[in-house]
Image (cartoon, rainbow, N blue to C red):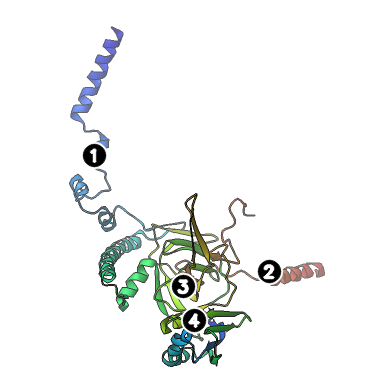
Amino acid sequence: MAWKGMWQLKKLVVSYCDWGGSSRGIRAFIESNLPAFKDSNPQLEVLTELSRGQHPCLKAFYKNKNERVVCVKNLASEDVLLHATRLRNALGRKVKKLPTRHVTKHPSVQGLAGVAAS
Amino acid sequence: MAQRRWLQTVTRHALPLLSSKPTTSLKPLPHLPASISLKSILSPKPLQQFLYTDPTLFHARSFSSSSRDDSENEEDDSEEGGEEEEEDYDSDSNEAEVDDVTVSGMKREYSAEEKEAEAAAIGYKVTGPLLPSDRVLKHREPVFAVVQVGSHQFKVSNGDCIYVERLKFCEVNDKLMLNKVLMLGTSTQTIIGRPILPDAAVHAVVEEHALDAKVIIFKKKRRKNYRRTKGHRQELTRLRIADIQGIEKPQPKVDPKQKMAAVKQQEKVSVAA
């Protein structure tokens, strides 16, 4: 999530329910892991949102105006932390099948094969 | 009769040759040292070690289009051999430990040295976090390198971005040094490693740990009412190449605009004259 050293995730919203059983893990996450996560990512705006009667989810807002929502119902607090870290580590681009694993703007230094140097 | 006579002459000429003179092909090769006899080659010593430790067999570690000192390369040889052996031992011990851990079923904890050793086996080394003051990303230079990360090889120049299999023990915004460089080149010069160039390094920055697009694994057997669908998302790491070291970089060319301006000025001067 860091493009030229700039973190691309701007805002992370932790949405949970204070009563439901599927939010048990995320409640533990908010109590135990979230303060440390906030401290280690000062560039990040972390909000908690109470939505009763709903399954919990993590909403990520990126610099390129992309938005990603991950459902974390019935997950343990460590798994929620893993998902939060993944969201932080991403660039926020659309997930597509990669045509190539090597992206370059200048494909050739010594000239293309079969093309005689002029 | 004629044939028999011919045979006799041939044998008469050939016999003394075979008996008295040892033929040149049977002589020990001149460049081999005397210590290497046939026995030492046939002995159960591991072949790799033998090859690496004897500097006379491999004269240079790299082919280059420009001339370099042979003596320097030989030194590299001996050092390289030592390192490789150490790495081998390390990997062996690591494997043993991995087995132990899987037996116990615990999640494995790595010490700093183990992390470094595993990273070296993959072909990278973490050199520290990227600070805001660091300006690692420069303008494009006409240099390329072929670098190996894990089991993939990439031809990179600076400013490129590559997706490698997820690298353990490195965080986003870390600076890495990729040290398995197989080849370096500019527009005029090429250096080829045998197989790697020990002095060269490619510097990179970790940009992203992400999941690849989902791949659907669908298994089906005909007429057996058997279908299984499974999804998989591979973990990838995106690296940005910052710098390539180990080769002389050509001077940056003059901008075409400036060139044009210079040409125009010259033209003006000629017209005025």
Q: Work out how far the residue at label 2 is from the one at label 3, CA to CA, in angstroms.
A: 29 Å
Q: Are marks 4 and 3 on the same chain?
A: no
Q: Secondary structure at mark 2?
A: helix
Q: Work out how far the residue at label 3 is from the one at label 1, CA to CA, in angstroms.
A: 49 Å
Circle 1: is it few (<14), some (14-19), or many (20+) Cα within 10 Å?
few
Q: Position of residue A66 (x, y in %)?
A: 62, 79
Camera-nearest residue between B192 and B128: B128
Q: Position of residue B188 (x, y in %)?
A: 53, 59
- Give, as a three-letter code, the residue at label 4: Lys
Which disc, if any, is residue B203? 3
- Residue displayed at 54% across by 92% down: A50
Which residue was labeled with disc 2? B256
Camera-nearest residue between A84 and A9: A84
Which disc, if any, is residue B130? none
- Give, as a three-letter code, the residue at label 2: Pro
Q: Is residue B151 in sight in this rendering?
A: yes
